[in-house]
Image (tube, helix red, strand yellow):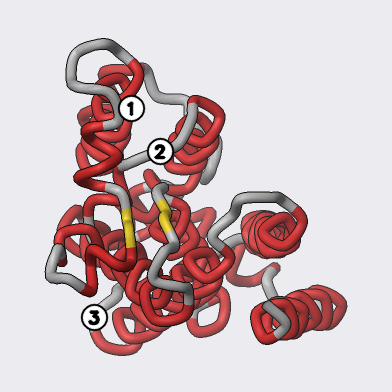
């Protein structure tokens, strides 16, 4: 499910939204490092700067989703999109994927505006990407029959590691990560309850669906306890900031 075997052309054809987001991220990054525009012009106009948002520059709740502060930052986020974006785009469709991505990203930026100082500056797609993780968590909670045991454990492990690293790494927008994850989970919960159908046949044959559904009897108690512990850690870390 999360292993990409498509050719470059197939990837573009199968996952146009993920491809477009990655392309925009790369283009904007190149514009920030190449001597094309005045130095720091893009960052000055598109980064999330809380005080400017409060003064009416509302677009800064949206544009930081596509901006990155360095090559490593860009590479990590694009790599995460390549791994986890395609199966979700195929499962829920292009329009809903965009909705999930932007609701998580904008929600994370709104939370940053409310909870961080007016002088706080932030960029990056991490809030939106954590929203993808949150959506998969919603699938595990409400429709775990749609995922194999292996993929369930992988998603939980990646999410747990991501939350832990949020508090260990410097210069990370903790608020965006946590609230992006929450926004993705809430959006996924709403979609699953009202409109999401068994669309994963695009990535897994029906025979495998039935086999996985028989083998998957629920998330192990140890996994639930670990994930619950990380959520508690996240809340404690947030309250202690």
Q: Is residue 169 above or below residue 131?
A: above
Judging depth in this view, the residue of 175 and 90 nearest the camera is 175
Rendered image: mark on residue 13 = none
In the rendered image, is residue 70 in sight? Answer: yes
Where disc 3 sits, the SS reads: loop
Left or right: residue 158 compared with residue 61: right
Dividing the picture into quarters, in which one does residue 229 lie?
Answer: bottom right
Q: Position of residue 124 (x, y in %)?
A: 41, 47
Dividing the picture into quarters, in which one does residue 9 lie?
Answer: top left
Specify which label sits upstream in the sequence, 2 or 3.
2
Rendered image: mark on residue 29 = 1
Query: Which residue shows up at 20% across the image and 22% down it?
Result: 38
Q: Is residue 139 above or below residue 59?
A: below
Query: Which residue shows up at 30% across the image and 25% down it?
Result: 32
Q: Is residue 108 above or below residue 172?
A: below
Where disc 1 sits, the SS reads: helix
Q: Position of residue 200 (x, y in %)?
A: 38, 58
Query: Which residue shows up at 43% across the image and 65% down it?
Result: 131
Query: Which residue shows up at 70% across the image and 68% down it?
Result: 215
Rendered image: mark on residue 68 = 2
Q: Are marks 2 and 1 in contact (CB under 8 Å)?
A: yes
Specify which label sits upstream in the sequence, 2 or 1.
1
Where disc 2 sits, the SS reads: loop
Q: CA distance from mark 3 to mark 1?
A: 36 Å
Say few, some or many: other residues with alpha carbon within 10 Å of mark 1 (under 14 / 14 to 19 / 20 or more): many
Residue located beneath label 3 in the image: 195
Q: Is residue 103 above or below residue 86?
A: below
């Amino acid at each position: 499910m999360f292993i990409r075997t498509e050719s470059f052309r197939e990837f573009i054809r199968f996952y146009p939204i993920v491809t477009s987001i990655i392309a925009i991220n790369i283009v904007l990054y190149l514009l920030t490092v190449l001597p094309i525009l005045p130095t720091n012009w893009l960052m000055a106009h598109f980064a999330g700067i809380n005080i400017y948002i409060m003064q009416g520059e509302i677009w800064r709740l949206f544009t930081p989703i596509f901006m990155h502060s360095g090559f490593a930052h860009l590479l990590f986020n694009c790599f995460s999109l390549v791994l986890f974006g395609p199966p979700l785009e195929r499962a829920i469709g292009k329009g809903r994927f965009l909705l999930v991505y932007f609701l998580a990203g904008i929600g994370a930026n709104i939370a940053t505006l409310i909870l961080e100082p007016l002088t706080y500056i932030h960029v990056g797609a991490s809030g939106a990407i954590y929203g993808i993780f949150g959506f998969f968590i919603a699938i595990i909670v409400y429709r775990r029959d749609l995922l194999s045991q292996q993929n369930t454990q992988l998603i939980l492990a990646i999410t747990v590691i991501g939350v832990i690293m949020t508090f260990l790494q410097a210069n990370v927008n903790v608020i965006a990560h946590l609230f992006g994850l929450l926004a993705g989970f809430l959006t996924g919960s709403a979609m699953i309850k009202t409109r999401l159908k068994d669309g994963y046949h695009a990535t897994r044959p029906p025979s495998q669906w039935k086999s996985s559904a028989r083998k998957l009897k629920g998330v192990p108690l140890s996994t639930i306890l670990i994930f619950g512990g990380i959520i508690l850690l996240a809340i404690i870390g947030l309250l202690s900031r």
